[in-house]
Every structure is written in structure tokens, then in C-alpha cells.
Image: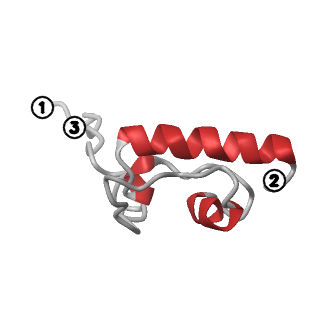
Amino acid sequence: MNDNKKSTPRRNAARQDEIPRKRTRMLKADLVIDYRDHEFLRKFMTERGKILPGRLTGANSKQQRQIKKAIRRNRVMGLLP
């Protein structure tokens, strides 16, 4: 028959090498995020200064928007990279 069939790639082949997603912290729903607290905001950034996504920080979408806005304000002030 036809021995030259191409093998189909496995659908989840790339996902096996990735680091599994873990929620590092769960934030309280009533937590107020202040842009002046740069030590708290550093927990939501990588070493290179990138903002971590909500799936890694454990923040819901509203909190993630507040974190993003606070980090950007803090960068303008020169307290964060």
C-alpha cells in the first residue's frame, strides 16, 4: 500500500515541555491596590520588569487591571523599572 504516510503531529506535544501553570497567590476580593506601594507591586513583576499575567498571579480580571494601572503609574514616577 502507501508506506509514505506523514505522521500527524500530536496536538499537545508542545504543552508537555512547558512549565505547568501555578497560581502563586490568591488576592482578597476587597484588597485595595495602591500605586505608591512599590514593594507590593514588585510581586507582580518578573525580574526583567514585565507584568505577570493574571493566571500566574491569582488575581481576577478587575484586580489585574488595577495592578497594571498601578505599575504603570509607578513607572512614570520612577519607582519601578
Amino acid type at mark 1? Met
Q: Horizontally, is 46 left or right of 18 in the view?
A: right
Query: Split into 4 quadrants, where in the image is the N terminus?
Result: top left
Which residue is found at the position 28% from the left and 48% from the top? 12
Q: Residue at x 41, y 56 (%)?
A: 31
74 displayed left or right of 9: right
Report which residue position mark 3 lands on: 3
What number is the disc on residue 57? none
Question: Alpha-carbon distance for marks 3 and 2?
Answer: 57 Å
Q: Residue furthest top?
A: 2
Kind of element beneath mark 2: loop
Q: Residues within 10 Å of mark 3 (few under 14, many from 20)?
A: few
Q: Is residue 20 left or right of residue 10?
A: right
- Give the mark, 3 or 2, whose residue is nearer the N terminus: 3
Instruction: Tell me what residue is drawn at x 49 percent, y 48 percent.
Output: 53
- Which structural element holds mark 1? loop
Q: Is residue 46 left or right of residue 49?
A: left
Q: Which residue is mark 2?
A: 81
Q: What amino acid is at disc 2? A: Pro
Q: Which mark is residue 1?
A: 1
Disc 3 residue type? Asp
